[in-house]
Image (cartoon, rainbow, N blue to C red):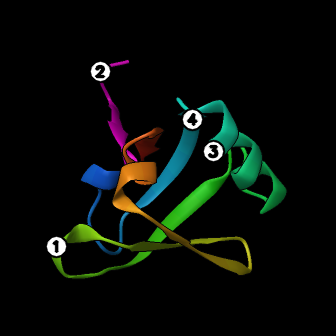
Amino acid sequence: MADTNKLADCKEGDEATLIGVDDEQLSVQLFCMGCVPGETLLIERIAPFGDPIIISVEDSFISLRKEDAMQMTVKKK
């Protein structure tokens, strides 16, 4: 999958599809917030130094630590 990235490598305004999450505990937490594989994510804001990252999933905003965003594999649109 050469065209996949980590969410932490995306820039503000990028739209991406969630492919998977490396950490199972994080995967469960994201699932509870509606962030599941196949879902479209929009990178809304990235704070200075890259932490935190705010994404939108459908009608929800989720704030992620950069450490967590490094565990999320996405495919840019």
Q: Which residue is mark 1?
A: 49
Going from N to C along the chain, the mark reached first, 4 or 3, is 4
Going from N to C along the chain, the mark reached first, 3 or 1, is 3
> In whole angstroms, how far apart are the C-alphas of marks 1 and 4?
22 Å
Going from N to C along the chain, the mark reached first, 1 or 2, is 2
| Residue 4 covered by magenta stretch | yes
Tell whether 18 sits left or right of 5: right
Going from N to C along the chain, the mark reached first, 2 or 4, is 2
The answer to whether residue 37 of the structure is visible from this angle is no
In percent of width and height, residue 28 lies at 76, 43
Query: Residue type at mark 3?
Result: Leu
> In whole angstroms, how far apart are the C-alphas of marks 4 and 3?
7 Å
SS at badge 3 = helix
Task: Specify the segment rendered in magenta.
Answer: 1-7
Q: Nearer the viewer, mark 1 or mark 2?
A: 1
In percent of width and height, residue 30 lies at 70, 53
In percent of width and height, residue 64 lies at 49, 66
Assess whether mark 3 and mark 4 are in contact (beta carbons under 8 angstroms): yes
Q: Which residue is mark 3?
A: 26
What crowding class fits label 3: few (fewer than 14 Cα within 10 Å), some (14-19), or many (20 or more)?
some
What crowding class fits label 1: few (fewer than 14 Cα within 10 Å), some (14-19), or many (20 or more)?
few
| Residue 12 covered by magenta stretch | no
Query: Residue type at mark 4?
Result: Val
The answer to whether residue 5 of the structure is visible from this angle is yes
Tell whether 32 sits left or right of 22: right
- Above or below residue 15? Residue 48 is below
Q: Which residue is mark 2?
A: 2
Assess whether mark 4 and mark 2 are in contact (beta carbons under 8 angstroms): no
> In whole angstroms, how far apart are the C-alphas of marks 2 and 4?
17 Å
